Structure formats: C-alpha cells, structure tokens
Image (spheres, grey):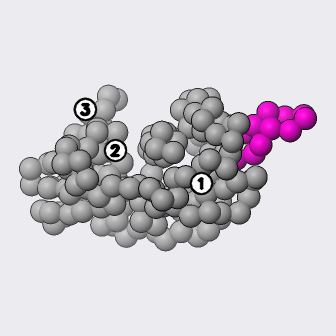
C-alpha cells in the first residue's frame, strides 16, 4: 500500500469517528492544524502541508486519541520486543538506529543539543540517553553507547509498552525514522 492509499484510508478511518472540524496536535517540535472537513494537515511552524508520512501518523494518533489514548505505562521495550516485528528489524535498524550511530557515534554527548529544540529531556541508561515526547503520551527513549576497546559505538530506541495500542508496527518504524532524522 503506497502512502497515497494509506493517507486516504487514514482520513476515512478518522472521519468514521466524527471528529471536530478543526483539531490540533503536537508532533515533535511542531504543531499541526487538522481540518477534517477539507482533509488538510498544516504545519503551523512552516505554514505548509504535512508530509504524507507525518500526516498518516498524525491521523492515526488522532483516531486513537478520539477512541481513548492509553497513557504511558513506563515499561520500555526495544523494537525487537514488540510483537509482530518479525521481518521488520533490518529496516528499522537501517532507517532508525544506523543514522543515530552515524551522527553521534564519535560523540554521544552531542545528542544533548536536541534538548533545546525538541520536546526532550535527559534520561537514564547507556552512556547518554534522552527521552523524546513524539506525541503527547507517546515517549521514545534513545540510548547511546560510546565505543570501547571491544565494541564500536551503538544506539537503541525504546518505546513505552503502550505504543502497541496506539500504532501498528509500520507506523512505529515511520515514527522512529522521523525521530531519528530529527535528532
């Protein structure tokens, strides 16, 4: 299913929930205005339409918010610990983990620079860790490890266990990729 089809399906699913005509949602460092009547999602910081990938996530998140969004349970899971990820790990690693290691592997402390521009805070774990609020109630934990005499630098992303009740695996990969790209 291409993005166009997924986008159309997400709008259809949201419209079945009879949402208000005008909604807003914060996604990472941006706020989006959603016009459900015109089926438009506008980034308020840039005054441009949301990219399809972000738009699909926003619509899926809004649908879950209308249905009753589960709160975080603060049980962190790696991508591999989520159910239904068989066959997706290589894509996840390539799109989400490798870019983080490439950017911060030599200097993991540099990731702290995002604390001023993303809804993020320092966290525990690894050599350096930050927790990012991707959407309200959807935290993502990123841990980085410095290289040592035995191993090269590494990173991992952790998701609150509640994410599996908010997004499907494909959405989680897209979300993680957008988070990684925004670091």
* 28 relative to 75, above or below: above
| Residue occupied by mark 3 | 4
Q: At x 37% / y 70%, what residue is drawn?
A: 68
- Contact check, label 3 and label 2, Cβ < 8 Å: no
Q: Is residue 115 visible?
A: yes
Viewed as shown, does residue 147 lie left or right of 177?
A: right
**Callouts 1 and 2 close, C-beta under 8 Å:** no
User: Is residue 151 highlighted in magenta?
Assistant: yes
**Sequence-wise first label, 3 or 1:** 3
- Please indicate whether residue 93 sits to the left or right of residue 53 in the image: right
Residue 153: x percent and y percent? 75, 37
Residue found at x 25% / y 32%: 4
Residue 112 image point, x, y percent? 59, 54
Residue 80 can be seen in this image: no
For image coordinates 31% across by 32% down, the residue present is 3
Indicate whether 94 appears above or below 148: above
Residue furthest toward the left?
A: 38
Residue 112, labelled with which disc? 1
Q: Which of label 3 and label 2 is nearer to you?
A: 2
* Count of numbered marks: 3
Are there few (<14), some (14-19), or many (20+) residues within 10 Å of tag 2?
A: some
Q: Earlier in the sequence, mark 1 or mark 2?
A: 2
Q: Find residue 171 and report its image quarter.
A: top left
Tell me if residue 177 comes above or below residue 38 in the rendering. above
In space, the residues marked 3 and 2 are separated at their CA atoms by 12 Å
Please tell me which residue is depicted at 75% across the width and 45% down the height of the picture.
145
Q: Which residues are magenta?
A: 143-154
The residue that disc 2 covers is 54
Image-quadrant location for residue 44: bottom left
Dominant SS type (magenta): loop
Q: Is residue 170 left or right of residue 103?
A: left
- Drawn side of residue 123 relative to residue 56, left or right: right
């Amino acid at each position: 299913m291409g993005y166009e089809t997924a986008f159309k399906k997400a709008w259809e699913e949201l419209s079945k929930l009879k949402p208000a005509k005008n909604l807003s949602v914060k996604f990472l460092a941006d706020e989006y205005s959603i016009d459900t009547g015109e089926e438009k999602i506008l980034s308020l910081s840039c005054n441009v339409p949301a990219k399809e990938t972000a738009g699909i996530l926003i619509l899926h998140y809004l649908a879950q918010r209308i249905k009753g969004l589960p709160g975080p349970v603060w049980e962190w899971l790696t991508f591999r610990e989520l159910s239904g990820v068989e066959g997706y790990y290589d894509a996840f690693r390539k799109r989400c983990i490798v870019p983080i290691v490439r950017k911060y592997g030599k200097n993991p402390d540099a990731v702290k620079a995002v604390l001023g521009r993303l809804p993020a805070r320092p966290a525990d774990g690894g050599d350096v860790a930050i927790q990012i609020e991707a959407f309200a109630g959807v935290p993502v934990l990123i841990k980085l490890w410095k290289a040592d005499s035995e191993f090269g630098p590494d990173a991992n992303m952790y998701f609150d266990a509640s994410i599996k009740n908010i997004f499907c695996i494909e959405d989680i990969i897209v979300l993680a990729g957008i988070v990684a790209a925004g670091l």
